[in-house]
Structure formats: structure tokens, C-alpha cells
Image (cartoon, rainbow, N blue to C red):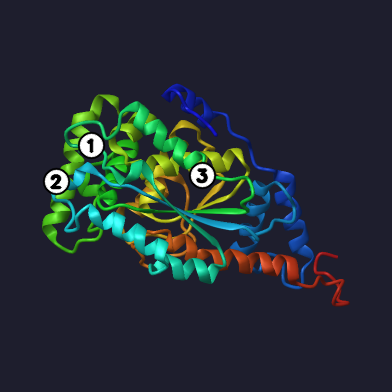
Amino acid sequence: MKNFETLDQFRQACLDLSSQDDVSEQATYEKQKTLLKPPGSLGELENLVGWLAAWQKKPDPTLDRVCMMIFAGNHGVTEENVTPYPASITELMVAQINQGGAAINQLVKNANAELRVIPVNNLEPTANITQAPAMTEKQFLQAVEAGYNAITPNIDLLCLGEVGIGNTTIAAALSAALFGGDGAQWVSKGTSTAAEHTINKQKAVDKALALHESFLHDPLETCRRLGGYEHAALLGAVLAARHLNIPVLLDGFVCTAAIAALQKLNPAGLDHTKISHLSAEKGHLLLAGNLGLYPLIAFNMRLGEGTGAATVVPLLKGALACYTGMNSYQDAGLPSPQS
């Protein structure tokens, strides 16, 4: 079990990161050249295999053990009327997922992946970020630890998702604090179609940015003051995956915002991650561009729960199936275009 006693200890863990295995990645490209197809003709599918090999650190990557991990949390900012739903919906959604009745259950089953759901801080809400820091340092680090210690070393691919009423407001606040801009730039509808809630979200983000402005030069202080418990857990999970050589598939806007601070601390901090899909939340494309991480698909999804990540898992499995199952030119008795 990992314990982070101070922010500085956690910060050092974010800086001490392994690099990818270039030799294993290159080996996949060399093998791709021998397979029964024009060189490079599977495009991004070939690159995805290379990415898996680079971070699993082996030339023949596997996807036998795919884990979808969902972190759930609640937010004091819901006091600002940023959503039509009460915080109690978070607990109800966790129950639905545990009972197998949510969208994510069906997609995970289709992807033949394991599903874990972790309520963070017993779903007690953070403080209202428009009035106070979301978490104390101790609370923040405990949430980080909850995410970090949830990751086991026997995972081939970690998929991340979240559940939490009000968490798109938090994602917008984190994004604005880390990359600039205001509520109007980063906020969109979320789960509500009412203009009132969108306006309230923008106001809440701007108020929070103003209140915490003097601390936002520090990415970890930004996460502590503006984030949520599930955001902190996601950050811990992504860091643990890096330390354990596990590639990570992120879900949408909330997941991406939660872990963005890792790249602000370390330019290579998110190299082991891919964004699964482009969320319908307008801030997601802007955030992805700032991070230099480009979503694999764009299906106009905005549910959360890890549904975008789960949707992409079969795509990765297809890429790997071609890599491991195709005949080579030699197998087919044909001359290679490389010869």
C-alpha cells in the first residue's frame, strides 16, 4: 500500500516516472511490415499495437486482462444550482452499476473486461469550491491513495471512468485553472439542458478561479482546491499505472481534466495514456489539444461512467488480433513488398 504523507512526496512520485520501451514498440512495426497487407495500411491500428507494446514493455502485447475502473464522488459545488440532479443520484448510479443495470455494464460485458467501482470518501461531498478549498491536504492525499492503491500489477490495460453529480463543473474549473480561460470558455450543458444551469456553472467556475487565484500556479494545489475526490483518485490511478507499466485508456472530459495536472508537472507524464473518445462537452476538445492527446473516436457521447473507454476496448482488441493472427507474406508463399 502506498502512502503519500505530503504534497511534496506525491509531487516527487509524479516526477519519478519510467519511460516507454522503444525497442518493443519498434519490434511491432518491424513485424507489421511482414504481415499480409500493404505496409502501414492498418493506420492507427498499427500505432495502437505499438503503444501497447511500448508501455507493457514487451514486443508481443496482450489484452487478456482489461480492467474498467470507475471512481465515484460528490461535490459541494452542487449548492450553486449547477445541475438539476441531487447528489444522491451518485449513490443510486453506483448501486445500478453494482447491480449490472447501467450502460457501462453492458459495454464492459461486450468488451470482456473486468469492472470495479470505487466510491471515494464514502461519497461524502467536497467543500463548495466557490467558498473554500475542495479538500484539505490530508483528504486530497487520501483520495489519491485510494486511486493509486486500487491498481494491481496484473492488468494489461486500465480503462478509467467516473460517476459524480456536478463533476463536469469541476472538470471545467480544473481545465481553466491549468490552461487559462474562464467559465464561458470551458463550460457546456453537462447533464442539464436548461440554460440556467449552464449559466450557474460558468459563474461557479469564475468565482472559484477568483477565490483560489493565488494558489493556482501549483498543479497539485489546483487539484486539491478545485478538484473532487474522484478526480484525485483518477490522478492517483494514472500515476500508479505508470509506475506499474500499464497503458491507460481514459474516458471523456472529466477523466481527462482529472489527470491533466500530471502533464503540467511532467511533460511526459501522460505518454502512457490515450483518450478513448471526444466528449460532447465542448471543453474536451480544447483540453485534449492543450495536452496533445487526441481522442480515438468521436461518437458524441457524454454519459461518463467510462462508457467511451469501454466502447474503444474492442477496437484495441481488433488491432491486436490483426497483429497476432494475420499471416505473413512468407506464410502465404508470397514475396514481401519490403524485399
- Residue at 51% in and 44% down: 150
Q: Position of residue 324 (x, y in %)?
A: 74, 66
In this image, 41 relative to 331: left or right? Answer: left
Q: Position of residue 232 (x, y in %)?
A: 39, 39
Q: Secondary structure at mark 1?
A: loop
Q: Secondary structure at mark 2?
A: helix
- The residue that mark 3 highlights is 150
Q: Earlier in the sequence, mark 3 or mark 1?
A: 1
Q: Are marks 1 and 2 in contact (CB under 8 Å)?
A: no
Residue lying farthest to the left in this orientation? 196
- Compare residues 242 and 292 and report the one nearer the observer: 242
Cα distance, mark 1 to mark 2? 12 Å
- The residue that mark 2 highlights is 80
Cα distance, mark 3 to mark 1? 24 Å
- The residue that mark 1 highlights is 127
In this image, 154 relative to 193: left or right? Answer: right
Q: Position of residue 233 (x, y in %)?
A: 42, 42
- Residue at 61% in and 51% down: 155
Callout 1 environment at 10 Å: few (<14), some (14 to 19), or many (20+)? many
Query: Can you say whether 320 is above or below 291 in the image?
Result: below
| Disc 2 residue type (three-letter) | Glu
Cα distance, mark 2 to mark 3? 32 Å
Residue 43 appearing in the image:
no
- Compare residues 20 and 63 and report the one nearer the observer: 63
